[in-house]
Amino acid sequence: AQSVAQPEDQVNVAEGNPLTVKCTYSVSGNPYLFWYVQYPNRGLQFLLKYITGDNLVKGSYGFEAEFNKSQTSFHLKKPSALVSDSALYFCAVRDKGMRFGAGTRLTVKP
Amino acid sequence: EAQVTQNPRYLITVTGKKLTVTCSQNMNHEYMSWYRQDPGLGLRQIYYSMNVEVTDKGDVPEGYKVSRKEKRNFPLILESPSPNQTSLYFCASSLNGLAASYEQYFGPGTRLTVT
């Protein structure tokens, strides 16, 4: 079965610094990988996806993710973090449905 | 406005009292799904539907029922709720269930407490 793992429950960064939220995957065949963000008391919002092609995927709000087949990773990145980026981030892989990681809480401090 | 709506947003009920959480989308999406979110576990899929009259079990279907009689609606039914079904529930939809490349759009969530 397809699955993803987010090894960090919490990531703390200072505003203006680069951020990375980690995700590793386990799939058979070609993976369809996604990142979603959840702000407090809200539903999930789509950030970006990797389907095929370029390993560097750009998404909403200045986020990007790098697909690395040899390391089976799909880390989310942003060059300069904002306080407003503080939220819960989920990596997901498309199976018949969608399988999500446990989530990583990102806190950006001023 | 394109959206997924859920009702109610908050619900407190007692063990064994049947309830239904409604989900509706106005985007003409074929695929709809229900998830529950629990701390430390992320989102887990309960049921999904590739199209009208086509439903299938996700990873945690026990204690839940669904139906898909119309394209826009996908209600979640708890015939006899139990306290372990206390959770935050999300409905989601995407354009095409067969094409894995489409992202999902999520509703605002329903917080259910079963006492």
Image (tube, rainbow, N blue to C red):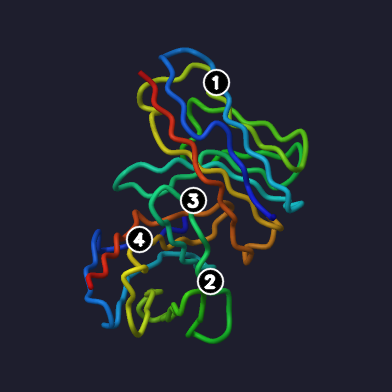
Which chain does tag 4 point to? A
Report the Cα–Cα distance between label 4 and label 2.
18 Å
Question: CB under 8 Å between callouts 1 and 3?
Answer: no
Amino acid type, mark 1: Leu
Q: Which residue is mark 4?
A: A87
Q: Quadrant of the C terminus of chain A?
A: bottom left
Q: Position of residue B54 (x, y in %)?
A: 72, 40
Q: Residues within 10 Å of mark 2 (few under 14, many from 20)?
A: many
Tell which subunit mark 2 falls on: A
- Return the mark for residue A54: none
At x 68%, y 31%, the residue is: B67
Of B38 and A78, the residue lying toward us: A78
Residue assigned mark 3: A43
Q: CA distance from mark 3 to mark 4?
A: 12 Å
Of badges 4 and 2, the one in the foreground is 4
Q: Is label 2 in a helix, a strand or a loop?
A: strand
- Distance (Cα) linking label 2 and label 3: 18 Å
The image shows residue A19 at horizontal and vertical percentages of 30, 77
Residue on which the image places disc 2 = A49
For label 4, the crowd category at 10 Å Cα-Cα, with few meaning under 14, some 14 to 19 and many 20 or more, is some
Residue at image mark 1: B19
Q: Residue sitting at 39 percent across and 26 percent down?
A: B113
The amino acid type found where label 3 is placed reads Gly
Q: Is residue A106 left or right of residue B31?
A: left
